Amino acid sequence: MATLLKHVSLLLLALFLSPTSAQSPAAAPAAPAAAAAPAPTPSSPPTDIIRILNKAGGFTTLIRLLKTTQVANQINSQLLTSSGGITFFAPTDSAFSNLKPGFLNSLNDQQKNELVQFHILPSLVALSNFDTLSNPVRTQAGADPDRLALNVTGSGNQVNMTTGVVNATVGGTVYTDSQLAVYQVDKVLLPRDFFEAKSPAPAPAPATSKTKASKKKAAEGPGSPADDSAAITWKQRKEMWGAIVGAAVMGFWL
Ligand SMILES: *[C@@H]1O[C@H](CO)[C@@H](O)[C@H](O)[C@H]1NC(C)=O
Ligand SMILES: *[C@@H]1O[C@H](CO)[C@@H](O)[C@H](O)[C@H]1NC(C)=O
Ligand SMILES: *[C@@H]1O[C@H](CO)[C@@H](O)[C@H](O)[C@H]1NC(C)=O
């Protein structure tokens, strides 16, 4: 009996040690969870946001951003499928030139995408109806009432906006039909999200963990070190239990 016990405890020790030492390759950062890229539509859409902005003129930087982030395709296909329409706040080239030099380039792909989505409302709002919206207004960047707040106040055809970081004014209607309204804005609407998290590094996505919490963290962008340690602790705990169960089963066979 004493020998068996000794065997079991040695086994336990061995099993407990081996998966722990094997964990470092598993803990290596995986590819960042990229925002799902919308598939381009096969048929040519009746409304093309790029064509509209090109025709209006003065939106060179915005057009480039819409293309590189693929949000232009997303808008065009949304217009084909959504019934509520889209409102798009279009910052002019001079709005972009008022940003800090190098700011746009400092954003990673996910942040560029978030920036463009922050200028889109998932419904058609007429210029005279902005006073009917309740603040903060939900943009396509997400619903976080602090980090992604966009407050709009309208009175008559005068519409003001604030993100908490930037105050902007709607400078006029670029385009409008029954599905799409494009309004010119004099500032790039920067979400507070960009300024509250200092590190622009993408969050490493734990390869094994698919919990809601970690997905949410990854979606929130810049990762905190807490992500990793939590994932490892969880992994270690799992492995420890695996070792104990394994040892118990082996114990019966010895
Ligand atoms: C918008 O802001 C301007 C000043 O920037 C102010 O004069 C005007 O009253 C504001 N309009 C609304 C509807 O808030
Ligand atoms: C936006 O409006 C909400 C509700 O009125 C308010 O609580 C919040 O502080 C406002 N945020 C900004 C950035 O103005
Ligand atoms: C935005 O406007 C509010 C008042 O309307 C003002 O308190 C705030 O300082 C302004 N913010 C910026 C960034 O201009």
Image: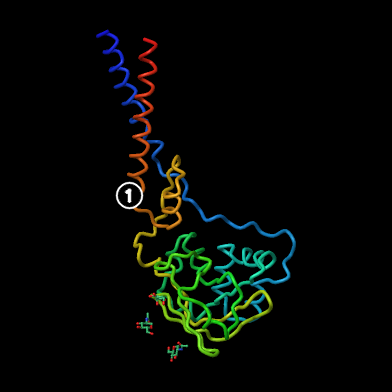
Residue found 45% across the figure and 77% down from its top: 151
How many numbered marks have been drawn onto this rendered protein structure? 1
119 shown above or below 23: below
Examine the image and state in which quarter residue 89 appears.
bottom right
User: Which corner quadrant holds the N terminus?
Assistant: top left
> Does 126 sit left or right of 224 as displayed?
right
Amino acid, disc 1: Ala
Q: Position of residue 96 (x, y in %)?
A: 48, 76
Residue found 53% across the figure and 81% down from its top: 132
> Does 161 sit left or right of 228 as displayed?
right
Mark 1 residue crowding within 10 angstroms, few (<14) / some (14–19) / many (20+): few
The chosen color scheme is: rainbow
Instruction: Write down which quadrant ligand 1 falls in.
Output: bottom left
Indicate the secondary structure of the residue bearing disc 1.
helix
The extreme left residue here reads: 2
Whether ligand 2 has any atom under 8 Å from the Cβ at mark 1 is answered as no
41 shown above or below 240: below
Residue found 52% across the figure and 72% down from its top: 119
Q: Position of residue 212 (x, y in %)?
A: 45, 49
Which residue occupies the foreground of this view, 109 or 192?
Answer: 192
221 shown above or below 26: below
Question: Which residue lies under the disc numbered 1?
Answer: 226
User: Which corner quadrant holds the C terminus?
Assistant: top left
Which residue occupies the foreground of this view, 254 or 186?
Answer: 254
Residue found 55% across the figure and 89% down from its top: 157
Q: Position of residue 175 (x, y in %)?
A: 64, 81
Examine the image and state in which quarter residue 126 appears.
bottom right
> Does 96 sit left or right of 56 as displayed?
left
Q: Position of residue 33 (x, y in %)?
A: 48, 51
